Image: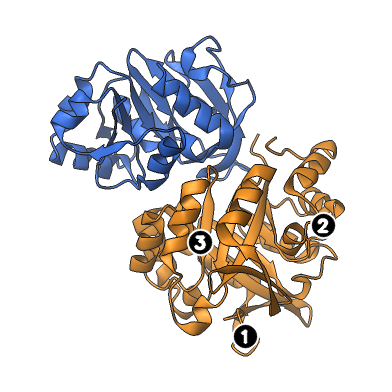
Chain colours: A blue, B orange
Amino acid sequence: MSVVLVDSGVANLFSVVTALRRLGVEPVVADDPGAIRHASRVILPGVGTARTAMDALNRKGLTDVLRGLTQPLLGICLGMQLLFERSTEGGDTPCLGIIPGTVEKLRTQPGFAIPHMGWDEVKVKASAHPLLDGVKDGSFVYFVHSFAAKENPAALAVCDYSETFTAIAGYKNAFGCQFHPERSGAIGQRILENFLGL
Amino acid sequence: MLAKRIIPCLDVKDGRVVKGVQFRDHEDMGEIVELAERYRDEGADELTFYDITASCDGRRVDKDWVARVAEVLDIPFCVAGGIRTTDDARAILANGADKISINSPALADPSLIDAMAKEFGVQCTVIGIDSQRQDGDFVVYRNTGREETTRKTERRTLDWAREVERRGAGEIVLNCMNEDGMRRGYDIAQLRAVKEAVSIPLIASGGAGTCEHFADLFLHANVNGALAASVFHRRILTVEKVKNFLKNRGVTVRS
């Protein structure tokens, strides 16, 4: 299986690479449209802001490449947020629009520090979905983020923090984890494994 | 609900894991990757690697072991010790670390906190504070890796905690030096005072000896995580045992 990690130039890919290696897959880190189009699985990691990441994808001419994919695509953290239509981060940032919905800053509320950082529970909405095979309701995964997509029809799992947001999204061939599966212990590993098996 | 984090801390010196008592007399505890794997398997929520010699020797932590640790860990980890510039931090993050913790260099140049937060985000920017009780107040110390370099600063702990938050720190690790390695419990009063002074997550360090100490900490100081070294390295407690105990006491932990 050929797995490509999209190199937007702003994300640290090392931990995702090592997580895939633990699953016996040697991913290719690439920003070349041809390599991305021909991969059997594409992963879009992301750290930083929606604006800098979208600027990087635009500069590299990758936005239409990602929109045109039909093979399974997984966005991680900011990479998931980029799959939606827009983000309010950096004013109003147009994103890839692969999954319907918008990304907004998590509601501020006393007692709920932003960024939402640490191990939190996911509520599984679509337990029969193959991406969630073996993922129990109430599993803890590792989050680090200030923005998120609201709960929407694409939500396969949600998380309750200062508000309910989409923790795992699935829409056609596109999937997203707001948390870091590569840093979420055995559960995270299972989700990555499930993604490779879709 | 966010889980309270149990964070084994591995003090690294010359490429080995060591542990001292009140920051002195370091004993060898074992190989870095081996201990990292053991804590991962026991259910640690995060690991901190602290190169205790780096700030005193004026050198950066060796990046090679950071990558070796990143290869085996499926939980987040933080690297501390001698990181003086955003270039230092970038190199360590590129080797797979999730967070960078700075202590003495932030005291020497507080604008480093602003620069780190701006470039890598607040979630990467952890500030370690070594603090001692003194005449009814709490005072910040620097360069505590070795007894002969340890110096008291002019800063009050509560003021410094507020300042690092204002400058963009995403988390504070408070090392209560009076309790370090003593295994007679965390300094609840000091931790509660700092927790009330800031709104960013606070990680307690120094003093863990029994499961009850961890429960006291979470039930009475409401901190976000507990760092501990000697109780875990000496196998007095396991992470799993601590978490089971906390769960029974009604503390939310990842199981």
- Contact (CB < 8 A) between labels 3 and 2? no
Mark 1 or mark 3: whose residue is earlier in sequence? 3
At 24% across and 26% down in the image, what residue appears?
Answer: A39
Q: Considering depth in this image, is B132 or A104 the residue closer to the camera?
A: B132
Q: Secondary structure at mark 3?
A: strand
- Contact (CB < 8 A) between labels 1 and 2? no
Mark 1 or mark 2: whose residue is earlier in sequence? 1
Q: Which residue in the structure is indicated by mark 2?
A: B236
Mark 3 or mark 2: whose residue is earlier in sequence? 3
Q: Which residue in the structure is indicated by mark 3?
A: B79
What percent of the width, then of the height, locates residue B83?
A: 44, 70
Q: Secondary structure at mark 1?
A: loop
Disc 1/disc 2 C-alpha distance (Å): 29 Å
Q: Which residue in the structure is indicated by mark 1?
A: B150
Residue type (three-letter) at the residue carrying disc 1: Thr
Residue type (three-letter) at the residue carrying disc 2: Ile
At 31% across and 26% down in the image, what residue appears?
Answer: A83
At 65% across and 70% down in the image, what residue appears?
Answer: B18
Q: Chain of mark 3?
A: B
- A197 vs A43, left or right, is right
Disc 3/disc 2 C-alpha distance (Å): 25 Å
Question: In this rendering, do the residues under marks 1 and 3 share a single chain?
Answer: yes
Query: Closer to us: mark 3 or mark 2?
Result: 2
At 43% across and 13% down in the image, what residue appears?
Answer: A153
